[in-house]
Image: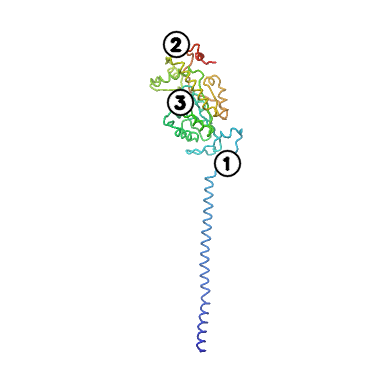
Amino acid sequence: MDDDHFSFSKIQDSFSIKSVKKSPLVLRMIVLVFAMVCGVYICSTWLKKIGTQTAAGFLSVKSVDRPCPEPAVEPWEIPYLHYPKPKTFSRAECACNPVRYFAILTMQRSGSGWFETLLNNHTNISSNGEIFSVKNRRSNVSTIFQTLDQIYNLDWLSSASKNECIAAVGLKWMLNQGLMQHHEQIGNYFKMHSISAIFLFRRNLLRRLISVLANSYDRDNKLLNGTHKSHVHSSREAEILASYKPSINTTLLIKDLKQVQNTTTIALESFKNTRHIVLYYEDIVKNRTKLVDLLEFLKVPYQELKSCQVKIHKGSLSSQINNWDDVQKTLNGTEYHGFLHDYPK
């Protein structure tokens, strides 16, 4: 039995000795594997963290806009300062240059073409023309608003489009091109987007009527070598167009003048809550300081404004109307007798 006990003890001791001999190697392997796993884990965690920070850094550069400095203007002006972000180009260093929105509200043959060339002669003004002469742009209120959004976001491309540093942008809008039809909704749009209105009318509605009839005649007969022109840039072209003397329907004359007068009154009433200025073609022709008032209204720097357009109908009315005597008889003694003179008081 002692021998058996001895043998068992010997075997146990032998096993213990072998285990002790083997354990350092096993421990080393375990430590090595553990170190590798920890290294991989730490490395991957660190890389993820760096990657997240980098991505966040890139996102912050893209999405965070640099705040523009507070403009030095009167408090009431602040709503009228806009900072559009065009989709078609970048305003770059001019992103913090405020832009004012305007709309020229007028009627055909009221001098608006000439007036708009004066505005576009200014370095910092862009007036995009008679946009709503195209019917599908005014087919309903939604299409009107979509068009206006493009214009005021500086995404409307036209010959009048300036660089990214413009200070005022707008369009020319005739009263009969959807404006009065949807005047309530458009008035709300003007209010919501702080758009200023520039009303441009003619004082002498008889002179306007002559221009309307002559332009209509030329549209059909194309006096300038088969080409219709509403506006001209040479004295010779002006003389050719002015050679036509329309005959005015005296039966409808007073009714027509009253209708134009009423349309003007309704337009002014409809947009009375819109910030606006009222200008008359004759006043600007006689007194260019009216343009100073306009530039002050738009809050743009003063600049002398010029136009290449040439006036078509000049001189006395008697030389421009075929049935002048009938027109005189019709208007004498009425509220419109002043129209028989060049510029009524």
Q: Is residue 168 above or below residue 322?
A: below
Q: Do the numbered discs 3 and 2 sit on residues whose CB atoms are within 8 Å? A: no
Image quarter (top left, top right, bottom left or bottom right) of the C terminus: top right
Q: What residue did someone put label 1 on?
A: 67
Picture disc at residue 103: none
Q: Amino acid at mark 2?
A: Asp
Mark 3 and mark 2: Cα distance apart in space: 29 Å
Q: What residue did someone put label 2 on?
A: 326
Q: Mark 3 or mark 2: which comes first in sequence?
A: 3
Q: What residue did someone put label 3 on?
A: 176
Q: Mark 1 or mark 2: which comes first in sequence?
A: 1
Residue 66 or residue 253, whichever sits in front: 253
For residue 139, which quarter of the picture?
top left
Q: Secondary structure at mark 3?
A: helix
Mark 1 and mark 3: Cα distance apart in space: 41 Å
Q: Amino acid at mark 3?
A: Asn
Q: Mark 1 or mark 3: which comes first in sequence?
A: 1
Q: Do the numbered discs 1 and 2 sit on residues whose CB atoms are within 8 Å? A: no
